[in-house]
Amino acid sequence: MRFSLAIFLLTSVACTFAQIFQIGAPAPGAKLKAGKPFVIQVEQPNSLGPIEPISVAIGLQRCGSSPCSNDSDDGILGQILFAGNFQPQRHEVFLPPYQNYTVTLNDTQSGFGTLHVTGFFLIGAGPSPQIATRNVSVTIKGEN
Ligand SMILES: *[C@@H]1O[C@H](CO)[C@@H](O)[C@H](O)[C@H]1NC(C)=O
Ligand SMILES: *[C@@H]1O[C@H](CO)[C@@H](O)[C@H](O)[C@H]1NC(C)=O
Ligand SMILES: *[C@@H]1O[C@H](CO)[C@@H](O)[C@H](O)[C@H]1NC(C)=O
Ligand SMILES: *[C@@H]1O[C@H](CO)[C@@H](O)[C@H](O)[C@H]1NC(C)=O
């Protein structure tokens, strides 16, 4: 009984955790043009339990002429484009609360890349710390 309750709790934490946040923009496969500011939109959908967003680190991994590997084990963030507070707000009724981070690349070479967003959250009444990472693959259009 106690065991199945533990499993249930673990599962519901995992489910809550799964939708803890998402990358609203750029879209997968987006072309990022060097010198042109673009928005990384980090969304936090409404969740079942209390989740307090604390911070994010956004990194761009560059992979040159071939797409980045999907092996998440390496945990690489690449060049840090932003690291700091994450305080999502509701702006549009049809979108979950989000925060926009505007960055500009100054790459000279074109190539494949992956944007990684790692978020730090406090979850539940405890609360307990949680870290989650999302990614989106992009292509970089260099200035040359
Ligand atoms: C990695 O996965 C994303 C979707 O999750 C896909 O768009 C991309 O093409 C994949 N990359 C490789 C190298 O398989
Ligand atoms: C990127 O996210 C996809 C799921 O959206 C996952 O399958 C893949 O392992 C992740 N890749 C990295 C490098 O974290
Ligand atoms: C966030 O960025 C998106 C995409 O550029 C834009 O449509 C939206 O208006 C921005 N929201 C705010 C509050 O600046
Ligand atoms: C832009 O270029 C400078 C070096 O000229 C580098 O230090 C910086 O990290 C670059 N910024 C981005 C966002 O690529």
Image (cartoon, grey):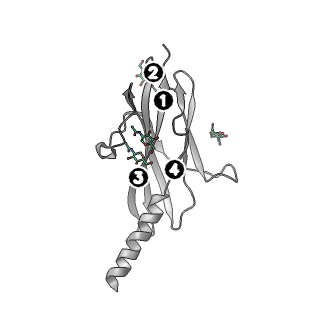
Q: Nearer the viewer, mark 2 or mark 4?
A: 2
State the count of labels.
4
* Eye-nearest disc, 4 or 1: 1
Residue ID for mark 2: 110
Q: Residue furthest left?
A: 74
Gap between marks 3 and 4 measured at Cα: 10 Å
Q: Residue furthest right?
A: 93
Q: Earlier in the sequence, mark 1 or mark 2?
A: 2
Taking 113 as reference, is 43 left or right?
A: right
- Checking the image for residue 139, the label placed there is 1
The local secondary structure at tag 3 comes to strand
Q: Amino acid at mark 2?
A: Ser
Q: Are marks 1 and 2 in contact (CB under 8 Å)?
A: yes
Density class for disc 2 (Cα within 10 Å; few <14, some 14-19, many ≥20) is: some
Tell me which amino acid carries mark 4.
Answer: Gln
Label 1 crowding class (10 Å Cα cut-off): few <14, some 14-19, many 20+?
A: many
**Residues marked 2 and 4 touching at CB (< 8 Å):** no
Compared to 126, does 29 lie above or below?
Answer: above
- Other-residue count near label 3 (Cα within 10 Å), few / some / many at <14 / 14–19 / ≥20: some
* Image coordinates for residue 40, horizontal then vertical, percent: 54, 38
* Callouts 4 and 1 close, C-beta under 8 Å: no
Q: Position of residue 66 (x, y in %)?
A: 38, 28
